[in-house]
Amino acid sequence: MDLAVRSLVYLGVVGSSLLASGCLGSRSSFVGGSDVTGKIGAGEVIPASSSDEVTDGKTRTSESKGNNPMLDAEQLFKAGKFSEAESIFADIADDKRNRPEVAEKARFYQAECLRERGYLPSAVDGYNRLLKDFPNGVYRERACGQMFLIANEWLEPTRQEIRKLERAERAKKGLPTEPESEEEKKRREAYENSSKIIPVNFDRRLPTFAPEARALEVLENVYQHDPTGPFADQALFMIGRVKFHRGEYSDADTFFSLLVDQHGRSPLRDKALELAILSKTNSAGGPEADGRPLKEAMRLINLAKSTSPEMVRSRGEMLDEQTKMVRYQQAEKDFNTAELYRRTGKYGSAWYYYDLVIRRYPDQLTWVEKSKNRMQEIQTELERSKDPSFMESTRRFMLKYVLGTPAPTLPEGKEVPKIAQLPSEQSTPKDAPKNLPKELQPRP
């Protein structure tokens, strides 16, 4: 019994010693190292003591400012101390323990601090990160607006180039130039007095390299993150206008067409419609290229005439000129298609396209006359194919095996058809020309 009592007394002494030495502790010190508790709410973070551990093993700036770092950062922001506020906002936004709405607000004001300090490229990066992390957040529209204004500032030299070119074109045509406002005059003089080509920028408000390219990238992000927002149509128009000025007509057409199709009530719609038509006609690439841009240009011309009475009144002459240009290029393309079939000996297809030019483009007299001449040549060749003389046989042999352009021939016992002769309805497709010679008709 004495041994058992001595053992219990010994265990009690050992336990007391361990408690006194701190080897055993309370539950609060195990999970957090502090007895202070806190709640994560809007504008609040978990308060920490000097013994707390954070995700990166360092004490954050937000942990040294008090129990409500968000409130402290907002007070610093209102007081104009943007550098100190930015550091706290960055810590709050990066802290994974905060709620999403708290992190979003902190990220937005971090970018606002950078913008207020003049670090516009870094501010744009902050807004863009906000939009990627919180694509449907409450600060999306404000972030897109700030990005748009910054990109607009970076494009001021390009805008001055465009205005200078427009003034020169109006002066060349003898048209009066619109008077400049005082603000526009100051911007123009500042641009003219500055260096035009600066490969590297040392101004913290500008990107180090290629401000124009960076501005276009920012505007694309504005549209992608908020395609129905208040700045979407302006972003599309600005991108398209710069692309058009640089001669990148295919890219300009893409952005102008997006504006026309998706923002029908935009005040920029008529101007975008006009520039989209010009972009399509300039990017057609000639008669050898794809003909779809020409068809789209004609569709937009008809759309403008049917839905934009103000544009028809003020720019009706331009629409008529573009219509003639489109039809000229389309007629040239169909005529060249007929020429290809003629050179390869497919005279039935060639006849079809020559007749198509005559029926579809009666106002394009140049191509209509050329098509009629080619059809007459085919008719003459069919008549000469009946001649069995040595000279004609040799000529047909040379055309077919040396020049690679076989002449049309008549089957034995057939007579030369007349150009006005109607083909058989049973063996001819509905879209075939009515005056197609019988020998050139497709087989039933």
Image (cartoon, helix red, strand yellow):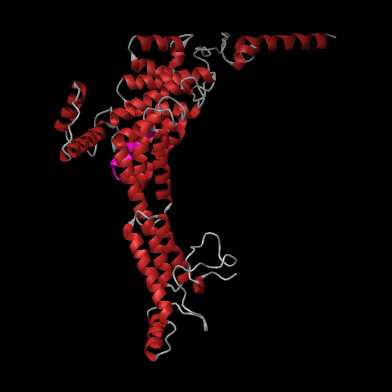
Image location of residue 158, percent across then percent down: 25, 35
* Relative height, residue 347 to residue 7 (above, below): below
Is residue 16 one of those drawn in magenta? no
Nearer to us in this view, 350 or 285? 350
Examine the rendering and report whether any part of residue 287 can be seen.
no
Who is closer to the viewer here, 344 or 312?
A: 312
The secondary structure that dominates the magenta segment is: helix
The quadrant of the picture occupied by the N terminus is: top right
Question: How far from the left and from the top, in percent, is residue 81?
Answer: 33, 13
Q: Is residue 397 above or below residue 41?
A: below
User: Which residue is drawn at the image coordinates 35% and 31% (left, top)?
Assistant: 310
Residue 111 position within the rendered picture, expressed as x and y whole percent measured from the top left: 39, 22
Task: Decide if residue 418 is on the left or right side of residue 187.
Answer: right
Quadrant of the image containing the C terminus: bottom right
The answer to which quarter of the image holds residue 194 is: top left
Q: Residue furthest bottom?
A: 390
* Above or below, 205 relative to 40: below
Image quadrant assignment for residue 97: top right
The outermost residue toward the left is 193
Find residue 24 and report its image quarter: top right
- Residue at the (16%, 40%) spot, across then down: 172
304 relative position to 196: left or right: right
Magenta segment boundaries in residue numbering: 236-247
Q: Position of residue 131 (x, y in %)?
A: 46, 27
Nearest the camera: 26 or 347? Answer: 347
- The correct choice, above or below, for 289 with respect to 90 in the image is below
Front residue of 95 and 393: 393
Q: Can residue 376 be seen? A: yes
- Residue at image location 51% in from the left, 80% down from the top: 414
